[in-house]
């Protein structure tokens, strides 16, 4: 039974209420009415406290919203992943800063090369997901982001920022966060155009079985087969499975090989570990990729283990 799984029991012993809440809700299937007490504790959890530390009255954190990884843009992505309450005033302040920043950025012209719009769609996709989650899906600024992403979508279903006119294939890096954002937005607003964009973007990944060339069948990038957290704008098969699970696409047979990879990476003790990192811990040395949260660099990783259990459950492989 799932509640006897060693990884589940380990997550339930976490000191972080976000981990406990997500495990009980998404792995054990408990109802929100049973989880009210633990949900109230989420803002006081160590990771959420670290992410909100140093916030200024304007909602920002004293740096540009996109500053890696300490700007409000990135902190919001992590806060949403940790299920910060939708009505949290500090998260909403940060969300307003991000919405204002990107609505100004959208006033600038779009770069089009060879008939394809070349935009950093992952920036807007991540923001669309966080702002929609925080109750802003019907805000004019957020609606403008969604409409722009749909307009920028390439014929193969994804997005790319590469200015090389010879490049006519979407980037997985630009497309996964964008699919995540549109999926969250779709849940909040509906609409045929949004649903169609989600369907086309999902098909891009499914057509490639999440990591293979659709022409040769070869692995596109072996780094994609390693597990990471956080991903930010990067890509790996576990994150792709996690995003596709939100729209219930893990019954598609084309994800089975990626699921096999995740299952095989489970340790003998029953956990999953990080196999690569896109962040550095705070060490007193300035770095463009310094994090305010220690996500774990040694031993079993809570967020990776949680995400692996999520996709295995969603695919019917966790019993």
Image (spheres, rainbow, N blue to C red):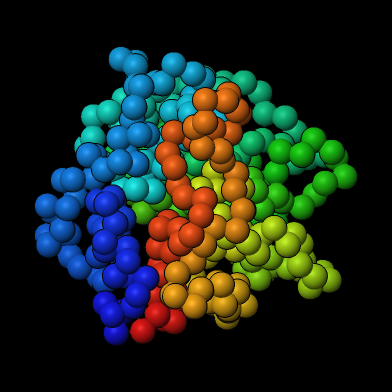
In the image, residue 89 lies at what x, y percent?
23, 29
Q: Residue at x 28, y 80 (%)?
A: 4
Asked whether the viewer can see residue 255, the reply is no
Name of the residue lying farthest toward the right: 166
Q: Residue at x 76, y 62 (%)?
A: 220
Left or right, 192 with respect to 227, comes to: left
Q: Find residue 137 and report its image quarter.
A: top left
- Nearest the camera: 204 or 36? 36
Q: Find residue 136 and report its image quarter.
A: top left
Looking at the image, residue 91 lies above or below residue 56: below
- Nearest the camera: 306 or 302? 302
- Nearest the camera: 261 or 158? 261
Q: Quadrant of the C terminus?
A: bottom left
Q: How many marks?
A: 0
Left or right, 212 with respect to 13, comes to: right
In the image, residue 142 lies at what x, y percent?
42, 34
Asked whether the viewer can see residue 260, the reply is yes
Looking at the image, residue 307 lies above or below residue 89: below
Left or right, 40 with respect to 222, comes to: left
Q: Quadrant of the N terminus?
A: bottom left
In the image, residue 19 lies at what x, y percent?
31, 55
Left or right, 173 with respect to 1, comes to: right
Q: Residue at x 57, y 77 (%)?
A: 264
Looking at the image, residue 160 lies above or below residue 186: above
Q: Residue at x 34, y 22 (%)?
A: 55
């Amino acid at each position: 039974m799932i509640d006897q799984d060693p990884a589940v029991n380990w997550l339930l012993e976490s000191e972080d209420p976000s981990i406990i809440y997500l495990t009980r809700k998404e792995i054990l299937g408990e109802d929100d009415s049973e989880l009210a007490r633990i949900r109230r504790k989420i803002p006081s959890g160590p990771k959420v406290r670290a992410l909100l530390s140093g916030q200024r009255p304007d909602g920002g954190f004293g740096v540009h919203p996109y500053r890696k990884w300490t700007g409000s843009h990135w902190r919001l992505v992590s806060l949403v992943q940790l299920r910060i309450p939708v009505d949290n005033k500090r998260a909403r302040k940060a969300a307003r800063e991000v919405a204002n920043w990107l609505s100004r950025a959208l006033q600038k012209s779009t770069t089009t090369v060879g008939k394809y719009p070349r935009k950093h769609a992952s920036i807007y996709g991540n923001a669309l997901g966080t702002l929609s989650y925080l109750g802003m899906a019907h805000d004019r600024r957020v609606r403008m982001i969604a409409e722009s992403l749909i307009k920028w979508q390439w014929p193969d279903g994804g997005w790319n920022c590469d200015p090389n006119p010879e490049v006519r294939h979407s980037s997985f890096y630009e497309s996964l966060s964008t699919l995540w954002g549109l999926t969250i937005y779709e849940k909040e607003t509906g609409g045929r155009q949004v649903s169609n964009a989600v369907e086309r973007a999902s098909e891009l990944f499914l057509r490639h079985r999440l990591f293979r060339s659709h022409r040769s069948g070869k692995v596109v990038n072996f780094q994609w087969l390693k597990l990471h957290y956080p991903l930010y704008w990067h890509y790996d098969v576990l994150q792709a499975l996690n995003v596709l699970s939100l729209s219930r696409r893990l019954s598609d047979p084309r994800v089975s090989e990626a699921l096999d990879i995740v299952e095989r990476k489970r340790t003998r003790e029953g956990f999953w570990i990080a196999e690569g990192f896109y962040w550095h811990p705070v060490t007193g040395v300035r770095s463009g990729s310094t994090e305010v949260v220690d996500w774990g660099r040694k031993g079993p990783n809570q967020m990776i283990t949680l995400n692996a259990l999520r996709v295995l459950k969603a695919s019917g492989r966790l019993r």
